[in-house]
Image (cartoon, rainbow, N blue to C red):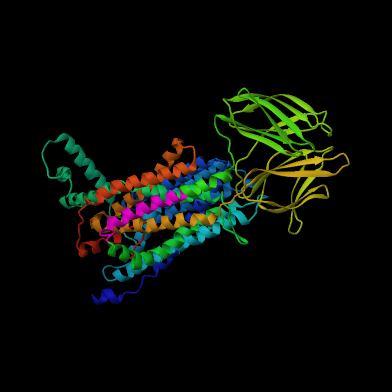
Amino acid sequence: MADRNTGKLPYPKAVGFIVTNEFCERFSYYGMRTILSLYLRDKLGYGDDNATVIYHVFTMFAYFFPLLGAMIADGWLGRFRTIFYLSLVYATGSVLISVAAMPPVQLPQLEFTIIALFLIAFGTGGIKPCVSAFGGDQFKLPEQERYLGYFFSLFYFAINAGSLISTFLTPILRADVHCFGENDCYSLAFGVPGVLMIVSIIFFVAGKRLYVTKTPTGNVLAKVSKCIGHAIVKSCKSKDKREHWLDRADDKFDTNLIEDIKALLRVLVLFIPLPVFWALFDQQGSRWTFQADRMEQDIGSWTLKADQMQVLNPLLILVFIPLFEVAIYPFLTWCKLIKKPLHKMIWGGILAAFAFVISGIVELQLLPTYGTPVAEGLAQLRLYNGQNCNYTLNFTLDNKTESFMIGPLGYYEKLDISAHDFVELPYSLRGERNSDCENSEFNGTFDLKENIANSFFVLNESLRGFEDNNDKAIDGVNIRFLSNVISPVSINIESNKGNKTKMTLNSSNMSQIHLSKGTYNILVGDVEILTGYSLKAGAVYTFNLYETNNGSYLINPIMITPANSVHILWLVPQYVVMTMGEVMFSVTGLEFSFTQAPATMKSVLTSVWLLTVAFGNLIVVLIVEGKFLDAQWKEFFLFAGLMMLDMFIFTSMAFRYKYVEYKSSTEELAVEEIKLPDKQIKET
């Protein structure tokens, strides 16, 4: 016993290479995933729903492939070669997604991005169950059991440190660096994680001569599957009564294996409700990121980017784990709210549901800032007055005549006109008497398309129609110039600080353009006509420009979609509550599972645990693809309700579960088989 406590054997130097490899790999994975949902939406043109689906399909595969990785390592290549070969696949995907994001390369961006994501998911998923177990292989047990505990603590720290740094840094590279003439630099933001993945391989290979490598001992998962399959077939064919249906496999499989599988299945039954938790948890990188992107992000002179909010999770994890162990768990035990490990998981699931209730409430507060997006069954009408005089608009809708006054360089909008494919709206538009427009009159029909923001610009002798885009601006502002000028002129948009020209366009250009938020001066030619105008994040503006008869210019900024006004820090409570739920649900669940499963079944258990994460992401995909909810806040409350229902089912299962204890000597024999997933490693 003295030898085990003092650890006379030297600490394995190979561990340093493995821990560094894990830090770099986790930096690469979380850095890429942090910005992925925004890239899918803003660069590949997907809507929020489709970007969410692709994000969660990718995550689903990343947690499905550990099954394949475990089988390859245990039954064929061994852990070292599995990690090395799949890391090469992983690095290829990381480099490919960065290259595909470079506009000058002109690769088919969508196709190559999907291929890259598949390679990354295969690589990260395949090595996931191998790295920590390979680290465990470096220790001689039981002599270095204490050192093994230190390794897992260090390994856990490397995972969270890589996640923490990359989640904070990658959004900065994305938004604050400009490359290839664009206002962002996704290629660099993907490229740095790609470089870190290559570095991780270099470190891993550098330690090869120091590693203890073990010959594959056979695929335990395959043995379990064959035994269960054989028992099912025998049960269908035989009517012999047995104490347990698995006992029918004793003609082909060892009795000890059958008993271990029985114990394994008792734990796996409790895994059935677990995917719902992961369905909520993994939306931090999709739905919650999109939610953050529609909020005011300035904190003084610093901007907290939407994808940077995800840094709260690893940061709070490092704070909460010791806090729960030292203070919260003892208090809850004293209050008799926790008596068994499964009780912690119940409270963790309830906290996750509460986090989504909070996010739903926040979403309700955000609704007024979204403006009025176009919707099925409706058509929108906007009429911009490009003249320096009043116009009277008359139209008949639903057998009712309505009349409106549109002021000089003003506008009129009606956003809820019922339409099926399109609707014809008879109108008359007359200029004010005793003004420059008194002889200006238009009569006709507005042909309004369903689900379109139909807009018209009043010129001297005509109406110019176009499709507006009043979708909320992302990462800045959207602006459009409508110019009623005598002859074409250049319009310069100049930063108020340093008078640096940000954009120049011709007055005939009516297209919508994207700018960073900030304070700008507007110049027509060299004449400054608008000074120090603040463009606020999330807003959509139309600038109505008019040239008078004496050659001077008038301009009227119109905000057709409100700016972000709810501050991003209002998201902090839901992140705090979700992370508390993760500590109670995820960490406790893994610890419970390892104490309740037989020693020979721990690797199988970890693979199935990771599979629950994959199924959780599948739940998100199915709900989003179902499209049976017409508002994001309803979806948040739906997930909260599902989580509460899920915890009701889990509670009934937990209170019927009979805990078992295994001898510590049996557990010691299987320490080398423990394969711990990310963010859930506990000191052995």
Q: In this view, does 506 lie above or below 589?
A: above
Q: What is the magenta range?
A: 336-359
| Residue 54 picture location, percent across and down | 48, 43
In the picture, residue 396 is in which quadrant? top right
The residue under the point 21% across, 64% down is 664
Q: For residue 448: magenta?
A: no
Most frequent secondary structure within the magenta stretch: helix
The residue under the point 28% across, 55% down is 342
Q: Is residue 608 toward the left or the right of residue 88 in the image?
A: left
| Residue 302 picture location, percent across and down | 60, 61
Q: For residue 343: magenta?
A: yes
Between 604 and 364, the one nearer to me in the picture: 364
Q: Is residue 603 toward the left or the right of residue 182 in the image?
A: left
| Residue 406 picture location, percent across and down | 73, 35
Between 666 and 462, the one nearer to me in the picture: 462
| Residue 197 picture location, percent across and down | 49, 57
Q: Is residue 365 toward the left or the right of residue 141 in the image?
A: right
Q: Is residue 495 above or below residue 232?
A: below
Q: In this view, does 432 lie above or below 260?
A: above
